Amino acid sequence: MEYRHLGKSGLQVSALSLGSWLTFGHQISDKTADDLMGIAYDAGVNFFDNAEGYAAGKSEIVMGKILKAHKWERESFVLSSKVFFGTVDKGPNRVGLSRKHVIEACNGALSRLQVDYLDLYFCHRPDRNTPIEETVWAMNMLLQQGKILYWGTSEWDAAEIMEAIRVAKQYNLIGPTMEQPQYNLMERNKLENEYLLLFKEYGLGATVWSPLASGLLSGKYTAKKTKDTRLELKGMEWLKDAVLNEEKLKKAEQLQTLADALDVSLAKLSLAWCLKNPHVSTVILGASKTEQLDENLTALEVLPLLTDEVMDRIEAIVQTKPKI
Ligand code: NDP
């Protein structure tokens, strides 16, 4: 496994990490979740991603039980949670980024995950009804209390991250260390355009999500077979519509031909492409089956195949490079 600094921070995360969205506490059994964490940890994965909103808190409960059962040393892994979406849909103060919800959500995550502190704590979305000052102060209170070690954002606009950095500087506080944006062959603007100044000037780290665009970039949907996948989960109709898009499916098919010519799986090629971007601190993998994770964890092997010529061929197929 390769380890990368989380932006300019001293913390190192495995280039491939494991997340629990839709899977832990929902799509998969607790036994499969346990198997996935074991496979990942044994392969050198040191970062596990979670959020209060995943399966309404159940994802954290499942992960907490697994961490406890394995008795892995706390120093050997980096654990995250995120605040914003809440765990229950009751009352205005159980969501968002107010001081009240940030503090209460962190305490909730610590108890569900059965740990004394979170290494990374993300603001899962911007809260445009709460002053950024209030959130920056709340995060710094948690840092001071030792309940979190680094804080960051997820899917914030560059201007909002800049504002958080400015506020932190103004009050001698600690600003965001990392962002968690979507990044894959279909969705590139934040990483390759919008955040460039943040990477260069402020050394922002990036823990990127949905590297396979929810499985589309494994090539498995070209036949439109969705049985036994996340696209059939209740409430995921919006995702099914987004993934089974004719234009994207056509691109996936062409990428598959390229992957075949290189004699690698399309999933590995797509993951390696994400890893090649030097601004990526870690690519967060998702998996509902151990075979998927076994395959994805070998994606680093494909990096040497990504020559300029292969990168150009990929670019010609996807045509998603942001115009700067
Ligand atoms: P991917 O885009 O990589 O999708 C993972 C899913 O694709 C798997 O669960 C599986 O779904 C399918 N899959 C994975 N590997 C293969 C393979 N080799 N062959 C065929 N199918 C495969 O990542 P996720 O969308 O799961 O995102 C990863 C993590 O990022 C999440 O767990 C979460 O921690 C984080 N995240 C953060 C968000 C944020 O807003 N901050 C938003 C979304 C995710 P299936 O069961 O359908 O086969």
Image (cartoon, rainbow, N blue to C red):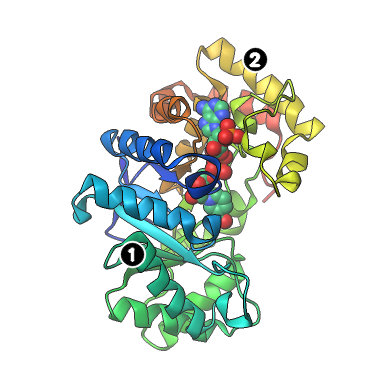
Mark number, residue 118: 1
Say above or below: 286 vs 13: above
Residue 259 in sight in this render: yes
In the displayed structure, would residue 290 be above or below residue 143?
above
Q: Residue furthest bottom?
A: 171
Mark 2 secondary-structure assignment? helix
Q: Nearer the viewer, mark 1 or mark 2?
A: 1
Q: Is residue 113 left or right of residue 316?
A: left
User: Could you tell whether 204 is left or right of 214 in the image?
Assistant: left
Instruction: Give above or below for 297 relative to 135.
Output: above
Q: Position of residue 172 (x, y in %)?
A: 36, 85
Q: Amino acid at mark 2?
A: Thr
- Marks 1/2 in contact by CB < 8 Å: the verdict is no
Q: How many marks?
A: 2
Where does ligand 1 appear, by image quarter? Answer: top right
Residue 208 visible in the picture:
no
292 sits to left or right of 150:
right
Residue at 51% x, 38% y is 274
> Which residue is found at the position 31% from the left and 62% from the top?
114
* Mark 1 → mark 2, Cα distance in angstroms: 42 Å
In x, y percent, where is residue 257? 64, 15
Q: Which residue is mark 2?
A: 257
